[in-house]
């Protein structure tokens, strides 16, 4: 059996070895992330059949949990690892032609560290190491937002740093309180001991941890950093921040709530919070004229939808929520990549500057349109089955409150459709101003776009390809006692 620790060790090791490769040849540096994530994606796919049978628990240093640090490669962790590797690979290919200025060696090193941290968060079975990997992800993100070095990027990175540092402080204090109460940092051991603890004693650390993680997950009202950071970063980094980083933050929130605390009495609060986050994100996106800020606010709305799905807390709803995470990663990754070259071609982030882009950049514009339609939830794209599962799960509750909430969710989808259709109208139904020469994105930019489109179409037409993995992942989150037994024996 292949050791899942390689999913973290390979990108982390290559990040530190990258300057050595640079001494050999500056030209090969940009290919290192591509090689790393080809390996990670292949390894994650290889592990999926194994973890569907039984979670793989890796004892670091040979010390069994709860005394030693361990990794838990279950369906959820390996699903996210595959998603991180896929998005990381496609964005790394895109960056081959897109990143032409600045300290490229530092860019690729930070990029590897960001995704190594993200993979560590989803695989660790130790809550302190969750904090460590979370910090690797966040610190790399701060630096990459400021990569271009302009005033807007540096200002956005500082805002992101300040809010992220406050969130990290809350997270660390919450972890310290848990350690003081129970004398352990292993998630399964914490979950076992919390079963017999009073709810009042664990409420404060739970709130601190959820608040700390909620900053990166962009849950309202902790999302003020996101629009500036996503709009100021290079489009390749915007795609990773929106398609991976905030999803990993949300994964951490869900893992803590379901596995450690089993906080079923908090789910109604999170259902309201999810719908509120969704509506605020979608309404703010509707008001934007800047394409990247529009996509950033759209990500906030999508996170709200996923929080709502998770809060329903049924197997069907969790499957839908996880499917929506996959759908959002594919759709938003594609949208930021296509927007990057349309911005480069037009010289502006204003939506009005994209008039007639459908004729000038037909393949890029078509890819953007497919990504937009997928996020809105139109068939036959992957966004349709994921949203359908969430709506069906909410209606299956047969409670008037959830019926009202799903009505508000559908209202958010209508708003989402309105602003995406507005952009599509600008692309195809407005005449181009100035130079109307037909010139699409370069091959290195088109390849990841085509692959994203292929995944969006194939998974939308054949959702059963991933349903088994999603069902197993949902089961892992719902059945915390089975998780405890699989880790502690």
Image (cartoon, rainbow, N blue to C red):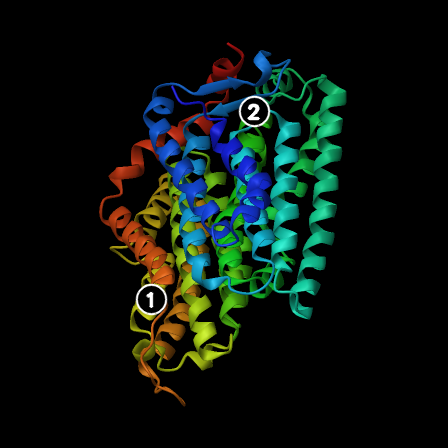
Q: Position of residue 276 (x, y in %)?
A: 55, 54
Q: Is residue 286 shown above or below 193?
A: below
For label 2, count other residues whose C-alpha is less than 10 Å away and answer few (under 14), some (14-19) or many (20+): many
- Total numbered badges shown on the rendered structure: 2
- Hey, which quadrant is residue 444 in on the image? bottom left
Which secondary structure, mark 1?
helix
Do tag 1 and tag 2 residues touch (Cβ < 8 Å)?
no
Depth order, front residue of 5/134: 5
Secondary-structure class at tag 2: loop
Residue found farthest to the top: 489
Label 1 sits on residue: 369
Which residue extends farthest bottom?
434
Q: What x and y, as percent, mark residue 95?
A: 46, 57
Q: CA distance from mark 1 to mark 2?
A: 40 Å
For the N terminus, the image quarter is top left
Quarter of the view holding residue 358? bottom left
């Amino acid at each position: 059996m292949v050791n899942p620790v390689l999913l973290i060790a390979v990108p982390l090791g290559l990040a530190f070895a990258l300057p050595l490769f640079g001494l050999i040849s500056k030209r090969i540096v940009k290919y290192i992330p591509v090689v790393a994530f080809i390996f990670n994606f292949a390894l994650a796919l290889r592990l999926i059949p194994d973890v569907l049978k039984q979670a793989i628990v890796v004892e670091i240093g040979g010390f069994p949990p709860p005394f030693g640090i361990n990794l838990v490669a279950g369906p959820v962790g390996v699903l996210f690892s595959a998603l991180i590797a896929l998005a990381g690979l496609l964005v790394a290919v895109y960056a081959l032609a897109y990143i032409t200025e600045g300290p490229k060696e530092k860019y690729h090193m930070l990029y590897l560290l960001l995704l190594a941290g993200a993979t560590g968060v989803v695989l660790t079975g130790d809550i302190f190491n969750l904090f460590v990997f979370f910090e690797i992800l966040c610190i790399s993100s701060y630096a990459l937002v400021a990569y271009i070095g302009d005033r807007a990027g540096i200002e956005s990175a500082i805002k992101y740093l300040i809010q992220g540092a406050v969130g990290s402080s809350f997270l660390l204090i919450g972890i310290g309180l848990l350690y003081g109460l129970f004398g352990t940092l292993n998630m399964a051991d914490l979950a076992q001991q919390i079963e017999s603890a009073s709810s009042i004693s664990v409420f404060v650390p739970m709130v601190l941890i959820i608040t700390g993680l909620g900053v990166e997950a962009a849950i309202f009202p902790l999302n003020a950093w996101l629009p500036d950071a996503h709009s100021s970063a290079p489009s390749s980094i915007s795609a990773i921040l929106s398609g991976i980083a905030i999803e990993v933050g949300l994964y951490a929130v869900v893992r803590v709530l379901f596995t450690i605390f089993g906080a079923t009495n908090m789910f109604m609060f999170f259902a309201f919070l999810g719908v509120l986050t969704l509506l605020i994100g979608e309404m703010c996106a509707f008001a934007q004229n800047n394409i990247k800020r529009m996509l950033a606010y759209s990500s906030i709305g999508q996170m709200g939808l996923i929080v709502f799905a998770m809060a329903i807390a049924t197997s069907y709803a969790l499957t839908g929520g996880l499917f929506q995470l996959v759908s959002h990663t594919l759709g938003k990754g594609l949208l930021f990549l296509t927007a990057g070259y349309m911005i480069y071609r037009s010289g502006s982030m204003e939506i009005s500057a994209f008039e007639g882009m459908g004729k000038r950049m037909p393949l890029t514009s078509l890819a953007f349109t497919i990504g937009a339609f997928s996020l809105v939830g139109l068939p036959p794209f992957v966004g349709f089955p994921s949203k359908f599962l969430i709506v069906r799960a909410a209606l299956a509750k047969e409670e008037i409150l959830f019926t009202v909430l799903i009505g508000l969710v559908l209202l958010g989808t209508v708003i989402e459709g309105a602003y995406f259709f507005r952009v599509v109208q600008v692309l195809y139904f407005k005449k181009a101003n100035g130079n109307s020469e037909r010139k699409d994105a370069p091959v290195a930019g088109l390849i990841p776009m085509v692959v994203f489109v292929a995944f969006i179409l194939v998974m939308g037409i054949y959702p059963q390809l991933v349903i088994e993995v999603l069902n197993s992942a949902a089961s892992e989150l719902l059945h915390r006692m089975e998780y405890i037994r699989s880790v502690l024996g």
